[in-house]
Image (cartoon, rainbow, N blue to C red):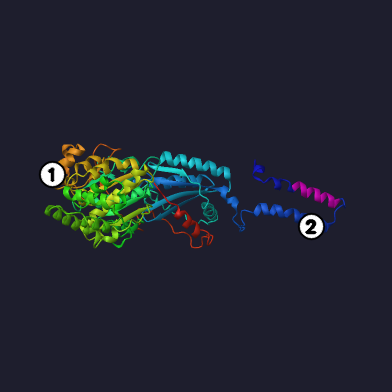
Amino acid sequence: MMIESVPWPLRLLPGLLGVLIALYALGLLELWTLLVVLGVAAMPFAFLLLKDKIKIPRRVGKDVENNYRVMEIEVRGAKSEETGRELAKVIIDRAQKSNVRFALLSVAEGDMKRSFLILVSREREALQIEGEVLRTLLSSLVEGVRVSEVKEEQFWSIASALSRLSLHSRGALLLSSNSLGERSFRREGGEGFSIGEIVDSPEPKKLELTHRDLEGHIGIFGSTGSGKSTTLSLIAEGTWRVLGIPVILLDWTGEHSALLRERGVQFVEKDPSRGEIAINPLDVRKDLDFLVSVMMKALSLTPPQAYMLMKALEWRNPSALRELEKAIEELAEESKWDREVKRALLRKISMLTRGSYGAFRETRPLDMRGIVVIRLDRISNVIARKSFALFLLSKLFMERSSQGVEEPKVLVALDEAHNVFGGEESPFVEQLFSECRKYGIMLAISTQSPAQVPNGVLLNTNNKIVHALRSSRDKEIIAETMSLKGDLIEALDKLSPGEAVVQTVSSPEPTLVLVQLSHKARGELQDLGHGEPIHPHSYFPEGELEEDFREVGRTPTRTV
């Protein structure tokens, strides 16, 4: 049995020596020749004996690509205290039982995380077997962990560098669930993004909004300080990051830019008062009834004023607001009453053609990629601010409905919606909420009081997120539209900031949810195990990892 442990070339050595000695004894081989032959023959045998003791620097080649596997690890609602320990236990156990090297790589940017488990081995077959064993163990033994194969070329040089890293420490494995790919926003098949955690669930469970939910429109209700603005910004962020749907956020107060910036979310900000984005309301004059309906809502026109506006549009067919003013001034006045109606109409239109005219002069197309925050608060006149929001919605709706297109999908989010949709019922608002879904437009609104928005808006927001409400009238309306039970009705005015009663298309049963109002500071470390430091003389290839880490970090995660 001992001979089996000897490499087969060494087994030939005794026979070779015997042949050489016999040739020398017969005089067929001189002494110096014998020594040379023995020296040459001994070199490969010496290499076989010493190859594991000598470290020979070698250039990393493309063949390394076949000697590693990469798996992405995601934590899906597991218990945070146990997940890291269980993962570390499985990985250490497999490392001790195989000749495969394991490395955990976590990449973070903002609140986005991705974590990868890299397996490296010179034996390809052993590597494949160990990869399958590890996937099975992690999926079956560690609760709430999802493991998926990753095929990305930039990992090969990282893997080759890790394979040559000298290890000295026997300390504990630094691994925690907080360092893994647990994401506030993730996409997986038909799933959506999380907006908070269900309060009364026996185990941690997040409530998600899906693409199907967004198509039913979203209404967020709550008094000042209850968290409704934060919830709206979370929805805007998740819609783009996870579902890849562009977002137009109409910021009435100017606080959403700060909320998004605080969470490290990238967005584009447009100031309509400076003409960075502009809407000419008369661009939709092909349908005069529709245009008059929109302007009637925007400027709070009376029926006589709307009639005079229609006459001016039909008579002169103006292409700009200043031209419209001239057309109205030139209308014949048949009575003192006509003069009063005309003057009142001109006063209202002048709100758009004076201080904020840059926002209404000439339409500038909006690049609908990512999140675009439109700073309505920069328009000082409240009537002009309201009008801009309505004109933007009407143009988007009219363009798509006239062409019959529904792509690309877009979410329009509007804060303080009662300032825009409040007041009397409007045919335009009712048509917008009931039909825009057919043309790829999804709406998410937030307002302090459900009693201040038209009934058609309440009926057509099939997803409702209700934070604390103080008014008995507001509570009554919400209880009726959501069919709330007694305990939830009583809780509406007692909800803490961030708490909300949520009803969605995919989860029709009203549920109490805690929305995350703030995010932990970046760089905060928690639940890290303590072990011996890495040996100061550990060898690590210089200059090979920096660029690869950057490449992995650039890989976008849409799930956060």
The residue singled out by tag 2 in the image is: 36
Indicate the position of residue 251 as horizontal and vertical percent values. Answer: 27, 55
**Apparent side of residue 45 relative to residue 106 in the rendered image (left or right):** right
Main SS of the magenta part reads helix
Q: Residue at x 61, y 55 (%)?
A: 53
**Apparent side of residue 22 relative to residue 482 in the rendered image (left or right):** right
Q: Start and end of the magenta stretch?
A: 14-25
Label 1's element? helix
Residue 517 in sight from this viewpoint = no
Q: Amino acid at mark 2?
A: Val
- In which quadrant of the rendered view does residue 328 lie? bottom left
The residue singled out by tag 1 in the image is: 473
Q: Residue at x 21, y 38 (%)?
A: 482
Q: Amino acid at mark 1?
A: Arg
Q: Compare residues 65 and 501 and report the one nearer the observer.
A: 501
Label 2's element? helix
Q: Compare residues 210 and 203 and report the one nearer the observer.
A: 210
Indicate the position of residue 294 as horizontal and vertical percent values. Answer: 24, 48
In reply to whether residue 20 is colored magenta, the answer given is yes
In reply to whether residue 217 is colored magenta, the answer given is no
Sort mark 2 into few (<14), some (14-19) or many (20+) by Cα contacts within 10 Å.
few
